[in-house]
Image (cartoon, rainbow, N blue to C red):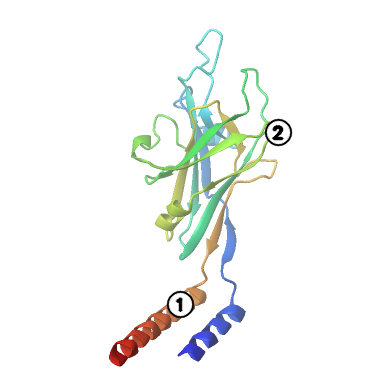
Amino acid sequence: MKKLILALIAVFAISAPVFAQTHVSPSEDAFTDSFYYTEAEGTTHPDKLWAGATVNYEADPPAIDGTEFTRSYLKFDLSGYSNIDRAYLWLYRVDDSWSYNNPDQGNVTVYRETEDWSESTITWQNAPNFANNTQGPRTYINQPDGGWVSWNVTSFAKAAQGGNLSLVLTGNEPFHIFESRESPEGHFPYLNVNVVPEPVSCLLFGIGALTLAATRRAKKKLTRSV
């Protein structure tokens, strides 16, 4: 039995990598703005994604006063994926300069959206009910010069594998701007997914089953000897 297990492990070591890593691009992405609540930003401003508290232009002077917000929506096609082990969402934060004393820091939280939406038509007004979403990880951002930011969305990806994974980003602090899939700068958002290859997962299952059988067999021998 031990020799068989060692042989299987040897085959496992040389036949395939432990994980197959891939980048999944969003099939759709857009943001919504509570101030421009009927505007489809995915159509009018398709190259950016905003998340966090934004400017209330009706204030005097206009200011970020905690009354207006933006949210970003991203959709990933995971219909061809199974055995997902890890998944991270990566977005490139823009080095945004504006005149409302943005401290260039703050938290952005990702949620899972289970209702459908369309990049070309979603607005703050017609977006799915945000209260129904499941909260996920929060990332603290402190990058005055911009750069890549990530969130661990493994639990969401595992739950959505075989279908669409829809994510929403929001925050209570001053807004952050990220590049979208239509960005001319080329820093496109993506989902970094690690998958256990099917042959490897079957082999691991086989090793586990054989190990369990060997353990039970050893226990029975020990019991009989006593």
Total tally of numbered discs in the picture: 2
Marking on residue 145: 2
Nearest the viewer among 49 and 226 is 226
Compared across the picture, whether 31 is left or right of 217 comes to right
Amino acid type of the residue tagged 1 in the rendering: Cys
Asked if disc 1 and disc 2 are in contact, CB closer than 8 Å, the reply is no
**Viewer can see residue 120:** no
Q: Which residue is mark 1?
A: 202
Residue drawn at the location 66% of the way across and 29% of the way down: 96
Residue 199 % position (x, y): 50, 77
Nearest the viewer among 188 and 194 is 194
Residue 166 % position (x, y): 45, 47
Compared across the picture, whether 72 is left or right of 147 comes to left
Image position of 139 with respect to 86: above or below: above
How many neighbours does mark 2 have within 10 angstroms: few (below 14), some (14-19), or many (20 or more)?
few
Amino acid type of the residue tagged 2 in the rendering: Asp
Residue 143 % position (x, y): 66, 34
Residue drawn at the location 46% of the way across and 80% of the way down: 207
Residue 5 % position (x, y): 49, 85
Nearest the viewer among 225 and 172 is 225
Residue drawn at the location 41% of the way across and 83% of the way down: 210
